[in-house]
Amino acid sequence: METNSGQELRRYDVASVTNEQPLETKRLLLKELVAHLREQRTQAREDWARRIQEANLLTAMSNEEIFAEATSVYDNYVEALATGTFEALQAYARNLSERIIPRGVETEEVVGIVLLLRDVLARSLFSKYRSDFAMLNRILDAYEPAANRIAITVAVGFVQERERTIREQQEAIRELSTPVLQVRERLLILPIVGLIDPQRARQLTEQLLRGIRANRAKVVVIDITGVAAMDTNVANHLVQTVEASRLLGATVIVSGLSPEIAQTLVNIGVELSKMTTVGDLQGGIEEAERLLGYRVVPKSSDTAESETV
Amino acid sequence: MPRTAKVSVPYRDDVEADVNIRTDGDIVTARRRGRILAEQSGFSTTEQVLITTAISELARNILLYARGGMIALKRVVNHERSGIMVVAKDQGPGIADVEKAMEPGYSTSSSLGLGLPGVKRLMDEMRIETQAGQGTTIIATKWRR
Amino acid sequence: MEVPILKQGPYLIATIQTALHDADLVQLRDAIVEKVGKLRAKGVIVDVTALDVIDSFSTRTLSDVAHMIRLRGANTVIVGIQPEVAFAMVQLGLVLEDVATALDLEEGLSYLHAKDRQGERAVPRRR
């Protein structure tokens, strides 16, 4: 692929670690390298696929699948070498990772196969230039930094994708573990337990607001009995949640406010008199029912029943 | 072994846009483009609204205090994640006391003043370059989680 | 961009359908105030369901509407603020403090009815 030397300079300056060669020579060497790799495509892929199986990598995939992916990786690899740009390779690595992570492929397998390809290609270079040691050295000088860069790109792409998957799973777990409960018509309860970091606080608020809309809730009881302490950040989140709920037409009752948390709220400038607070969840629910117009009527039997007024 | 830089690197894309802010209609334009870019960048609906609202406020400040300027929207990438950068630039009077303008605090004020702490809350990072009489540049970035 | 303002009994319903420029918002405000006077409406519902951004100017204008309407003895209720928009608003500290808000049109009408009944009763009765 023809590119002007100015662009080459920018792309390869990172790759050149021991750059004793003038840039023009390097360019020619890479061209020669890429031509060789394209020529060797069939052989190299077969060697590689064989080595992958011998090393017991990608056991989660069938031989056909391995060969198919090997082909894509090979072509992307050579393309990256040819163009000196790695964005396409990065995108491919992410895409590949997205597909194989659910299959249970591990990081060491991915790094392993990329290194094996590097070996296969290096060997083919040894083979080709075995009668010209000086030339072999020169071409390896061009090949190695670029090959290393590619290995890193693929490995990092895989790891990033993996981390993203883990984050998504954590998010899903968090969402499951903090349900917004519809207890009665128009009444939602959000019990909060344990430690809350700002990210979780945000997620709770989003879930609650969506819940208010979905359930057409008029009253929400946020129970923080199970929350030991709150820093000012999270306290702010609580206040914002109350305010945002009001914008959706819902009244919020905060139950289970400990003296410590009350103090935190006062410290950040909240006028507690403006917030409806109750001692415990039971009290919160009763207050909510009162607001909604329910009345608890004790009957002649032992159990009390509620009826709508 | 070559290293990748640990810094935000803006790169051009066909969706990124510079919007001239001169009329209130331009505020809506900047918002709309911001929304599209945010959506294409993979932000959640909530985050799209946060970004669009921040753009609205920044554009509005330009209009109110500098009578003209521009909003640039760019995708940014660092070695870990990607996001959106909003650059609000004007040649207005500058902010005399940035610290005061950025004073945080629980506030339900009717948004007198610049509302900059609010914009910072909406986004993840914010940087202000300003000098009295020399105009203001505000750079706010939001990262995809 | 004209915002349709419809009459429903003693109330007016203004439904915003797209993003509005500042000038449009001001025009809407004035139109509502004028219509309340002309039709002697007892209440106004402003439906903002379609707004995907409510910023400081919008908030101030909505607040202005409520205050100006109050001077004519009518109530205002803003309905349809989207969850994500509410979230963004409170980050900016825009809480529409002395303006009534409700979930949707139905709730908004319910609110206005309740306010009217309160006004009509000499002695407030427990519901």
Image (spheres, coloured by chain):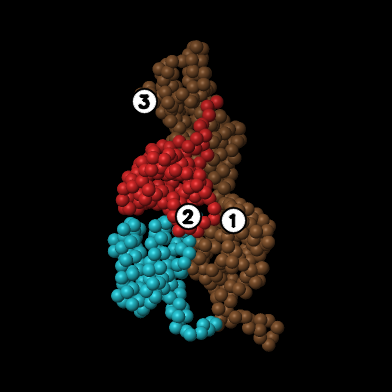
The quarter in which the C terminus of chain A is drawn is bottom right
Q: Which residue is mark 1?
A: A268
- Horizontal side of A8 relative to A180 (left or right) equals left
Name the residue rendered at 32%, 74% in the picture.
C37
- Measuring from the top left, give residue B45's x and y in whole percent: 46, 54
Tag in front: 2 or 3: 2
Q: Amino acid at mark 2?
A: Leu
Instruction: Determine the residue positioned at 48% across, 15% down.
Output: A20
Quadrant that contains the N terminus of chain A: top left
Tell me the SS state at disc 2. loop
On screen, A223 above or below A124? below
Q: Are marks 1 and 2 in contact (CB under 8 Å)?
A: no
Residue at 59% over, 75% down = A289
* Foreground residue among A248 and A151: A248
Camera-nearest label, 3 or 1: 1
Q: Tell me the amino acid under the disc marked 1.
A: Ile
The label number, if any, that marks residue C92 in the structure image: 2
Which chain appears cyan? C
Residue at the bottom extreme of this rendering: A300
Mark 3 residue element: loop
**Neighbour tally class for label 1: few under 14, some 14-19, many 20 plus, Cα within 10 Å:** some
